[in-house]
Image: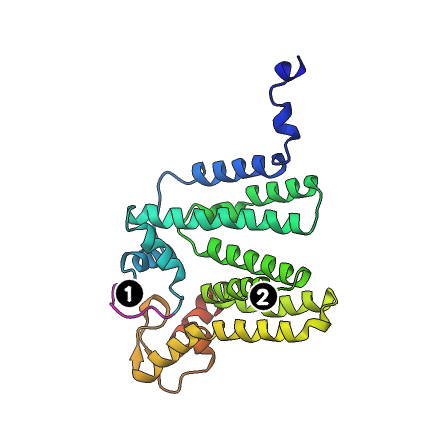
Amino acid sequence: PRSTLFPYTTLFRSRHFHWLIPFVLFLVLRLFSADPNYLLAGDQCTFLELGRTFPKHELFNHELYLIHSPLFGYAIGLFNLFLPLLASGLVATLLFACMNFFAVRNLAQFENLPRTAIFVGLIFLALNRPAVAYDYHVARVSILVCSTALAILAFLRLLREPSRKAFVTAMAANAFALFVSDQALLLLPCEAVIFWARGGRREWRLASLLAAGSAAAALIWPAVRLIEFCRRNDLPAGISGTIEFTKNFPLLALIQPNYLPFTNTHRSLFTQTSLS
């Protein structure tokens, strides 16, 4: 019979084929593409140390680490309760990368894209060279991209089916993204454009409440920085633990300590200041 001659026919006709094959490829590349000589440097060491000091959110100087919020370090710390530290960092990174894969798949399905288009898009996500490189290192990129995709998905669901549950979900997703990274501030204007483009101007009150709640979430970690800056004359709050004077600090330093004077000078010479 045909099913015997072609045992994989059922798989290829399955409604899960368009995402299952890309997901297998996604995992294979991230699990088996790493350099066997694994080098730890830069932010990898930072986040592993934050995981090791969980829940204090400190580096080797025993000072509260202000540049990044604690969510990714906490994720590593939780896995470190039962896994070695390096494995904890790699598992946390890969877990959020997988969550992002399914968030992107759900976004495509939510927009009613054909399965062929979803398959091609997910294959691109699986093969994307920078994404693969970040996902087999201890990097915060995966949690940032994942939280952004979840926030956009929750926002689109709120626009299509407004309800209390959808509103709370969208608020929680935005808060999560904004607490992960200052870069998620770009979410708010993006959501405003989507809101306007989809003709949701009649629901301005709902959108205003969502924006206000999201802005409140975005202020949590800057408020922690402000408290620390105000109670001390100097802090190792700059890049690589650079000691910065915190009196008369620039307001942008509340959004990102890289704008503190010494660190800003260093980064302008070697890298450039940016959100993180």
Is residue 264 visible in this depiction of the protein?
no
Q: Is residue 3 above or below residue 226?
A: above
- Span shown in magenta: 57-66
User: Is disc 1 surrounded by few (<14), some (14 to 19) or many (20+) residues within 10 Å?
Assistant: some
State the predominant SS element of the stretch in magenta.
loop
Along the line of sight, the residue nearer the viewer: 266 or 273: 273
Q: Position of residue 102 (x, y in %)?
A: 55, 47
Which residue is located at x 57 percent, y 34 percent?
21
The type of residue carrying mark 2 is: Arg
Q: Residue furthest front?
A: 164
Expressed as whole percent of the image width and height from the top left, the position of residue 142 reads 48, 53
**Residue linked to disc 2:** 164
* Among the 4 quarters of the image, the one containing residue 32: top left
- Is label 2 in a helix, a strand or a loop? helix
Residue 56 circle label: 1
Q: Quadrant of the N terminus?
A: top right
Q: Residues within 10 Å of mark 2 (few under 14, many from 20)?
A: few
Q: Position of residue 133 (x, y in %)?
A: 47, 47
Q: Amino acid at mark 1?
A: Lys
Q: Is residue 32 above or below residue 255?
A: above
